[in-house]
Image: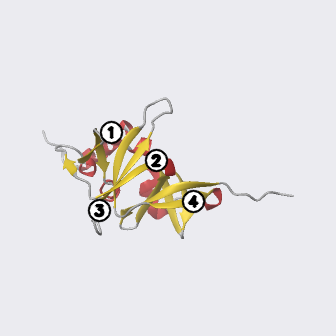
Amino acid sequence: MSSDTTKTSRAWILDFGRGMQAAVAHHEMWQVLISPVLFEVPRTPPYCNEVLIFQYRILPVLDISLLLEGEKIIPTMSDVVGIAVYQDDPTQPIRYVCLHLATTPLNVYVSDKQACDLPDYQQYWEPLTLCCFSHDGMAIPIIDLAYLFSEKFNTLQQKQKGDKSPTTN
């Protein structure tokens, strides 16, 4: 007799607007805030030029839509910010970061049977993607928060943005 039990894991699907969706592990989405007070930080990259002060922490707020597509999220009702947690390494402390969202996250169960490849039209996710799964006919990448908020990724972004702008002497 064979056992056909499928292991499932919980995840949050994050909606960044204009059809851009990605997921994080269930334990990585700590809280969701509606209409939080954000503060702009001068001389920072446009996709991460705001912070949220929350429980005595100053947290960066990343706009994935602006980072990947060059367009800011236009909220449908009110601003939604997800507070996520990650670790660079299990021996390191937990880090807290924020993501601009178009809507509140959707809690889903995901199984290995839903694994799929990242479609060509979503290749902008490729550097940030751990893997991908299919949900309601859409490919949903699972993003690597540690890499997204790493110095390596930020340096790469600055170089790419810097290469596109005219140099001044």
- Neighbor class of circle 3 (other Cα within 10 Å; few <14, some 14-19, many 20+) is some
- Neighbor class of circle 2 (other Cα within 10 Å; few <14, some 14-19, many 20+) is some
Query: Mark 2 vs mark 1: which is more N-terminal?
Result: 2
User: Given the image, on which type of amino acid does mark 4 rest?
Assistant: Tyr
Quadrant housing the N terminus: bottom right
Extreme front residue here? 55
Q: Position of residue 83 (x, y in %)?
A: 37, 49
User: Given the image, on which type of amino acid does mark 2 rest?
Assistant: Glu
- Neighbor class of circle 4 (other Cα within 10 Å; few <14, some 14-19, many 20+) is few
Residue under the image location 27 percent in, 48 percent down? 48
Extreme right residue here? 1
Quadrant housing the C terminus: top left
- Neighbor class of circle 1 (other Cα within 10 Å; few <14, some 14-19, many 20+) is few
The mark found on residue 73 in the picture is 3
Extreme left residue here? 169
Query: Mark 4 vs mark 1: which is more N-terminal?
Result: 4
Residue toward you, 104 or 162: 104
Of circles 2 and 1, the one toward us is: 2
Dots 4, 2 in contact, CB < 8 A: no
**What is the spatial separation of the Cα atoms under label 4 and label 1, in whole angstroms?**
34 Å
The mark found on residue 28 in the picture is 2
**What is the spatial separation of the Cα atoms under label 4 and label 2, in whole angstroms?**
15 Å
Residue under the image location 49 percent in, 53 percent down? 142
Query: Mark 1 vs mark 3: which is more N-terminal?
Result: 3
